[in-house]
Image (spheres, grey):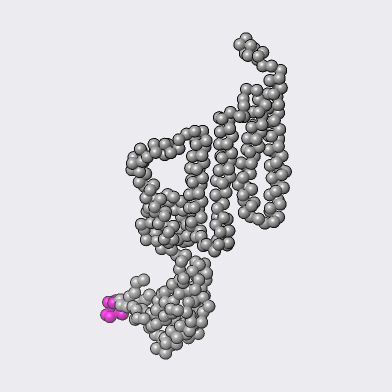
Amino acid sequence: MEINWKLWQYISVDNWIDIGIAIGILLLFHILRKAFTKYVFYFIRRLFNRDKTDLIRQILDAYEKPIRWLFVIIGLYIAVDFFPYLSNESDWFKNLILASLIILIAWGLYNLSSTSSLLFMKLNDGVGLEVDQILIPFFSKALRIIIVAITVSLVLSQFGFDVNGFVAGLGLGGLAFALAAQEVIKNFFGGIVIITEKPFTLGDWIKTSTVEGTVEDINFRSTIVRTFAQALVTVPNSTLSNEAITNWSKMGKRQITFNLGVEYSTPKEKLETVVERINDMLVNHDGVHKETIFVKFDKYNDSSLDIFLYFFTITTEWEKFLNVKQDVNFRIMEILDEEGVSIAFPSRTIYMDNGNATITNEKEE
């Protein structure tokens, strides 16, 4: 305690006043920071919300927290000018302030890059450049990595570090790193292949040998697919790029094909009429694609005369497809009922000869 007392007694009254002013300045800027966030920044956001300027509003949102810390940096810079034992003219302090400003600017750009989809939409509307939805998150992540790399480089350079030498030093272990990161590199280039060839985009329903579901995201390493059981499956890009990918969302039409079996007792004239009426019904159906429609008496089955139906629906959506299929089935039932033709079912005929039973005309389905 005696040593501390001796130290305190060397602090003059003027120094105590300067220290108090410095602390007061810090407190003042802390209050201004809260007031700006609560009133001024809120008013500016409301102003741009009214004008519906989405891009400016997102820029404001991205720089909200960096601006809060800007008040702290400004307050610190002014307070140090009054603090008796520090100088805001010293090189290390100037470098610290400049590095802090660089970090704040990069912080805002980093936040803004997460909403780069809006920037791409503006670019698409203004320039007419089509940007596939799958590219947006990929470019967003790439932009964030670039921002972080440039920021670290500028901050290190600000404090006198030789960034070029640092990068050259990393090159000494480049071979070992490349060997250790072979899978990462494969997945990265697999993602490049997926993005350039564009076998699917976000929201598409795809099927491969390893997964089936809806594409939710793609990044440098993997593609994330949500299955119909609502599970998330992460597939490495190197695996996905080497598999056959069926994109069900790209179907232009959806196939329906089946055999309709009618009883053997159906007269030839009735069978011809049923085939003709079903064909006309499909041709005139609003949900059936007109390009390919086949309704033919196909074969003599074990216990039925089979009519082959082959056609496509216009819609590819699962629920609408099922609705069209159901409506077609109901209309076929009406045609069969009106013509008095019955649908066949698996049957067995038993012949009795001197007490011995013989089973013929058997069909298993």
Residue drawn at (37%, 50%) of the image = 186
Residue drawn at (44%, 61%) of the image = 198
Is there any visible trace of residue 243 in the rendered image? yes
Q: Which sits in the foreground, 262 or 4?
A: 4
Which residue, as the protein is rendered here, is positioned at the far top? Answer: 2
Residue 25 lies, with reference to residue 107, above or below; the image says above
Residue 184 rendering spot, x and y as whole percentages: 39, 47
- Which quadrant of the figure contains the C terminus? bottom left
| Magenta span dominant secondary structure | strand
Residue 316 rendering spot, x and y as whole percentages: 49, 69
**Magenta region includes residue 160:** no
Residue 73 lies, with reference to residue 265, above or below; the image says above
Q: Which sits in the foreground, 146 or 264?
A: 146
Is there any visible trace of residue 212 in the rendered image? no
- Which quadrant of the figure contains the N terminus? top right
Task: Give the magenta range.
Answer: 351-358
Horizontal relation, residue 109 to residue 360: left or right: right
Residue 285 lies, with reference to residue 213, above or below; the image says below
Residue drawn at (64%, 48%) of the image = 60
Q: Which sits in the foreground, 172 or 33?
A: 172
Residue 10 rendering spot, x and y as whole percentages: 65, 14
Q: How many marks?
A: 0
Residue 236 rendering spot, x and y as whole percentages: 40, 51
Which residue, as the protein is rendered here, is positioned at the far bottom? Answer: 269
Q: Which sits in the foreground, 169 or 196?
A: 169
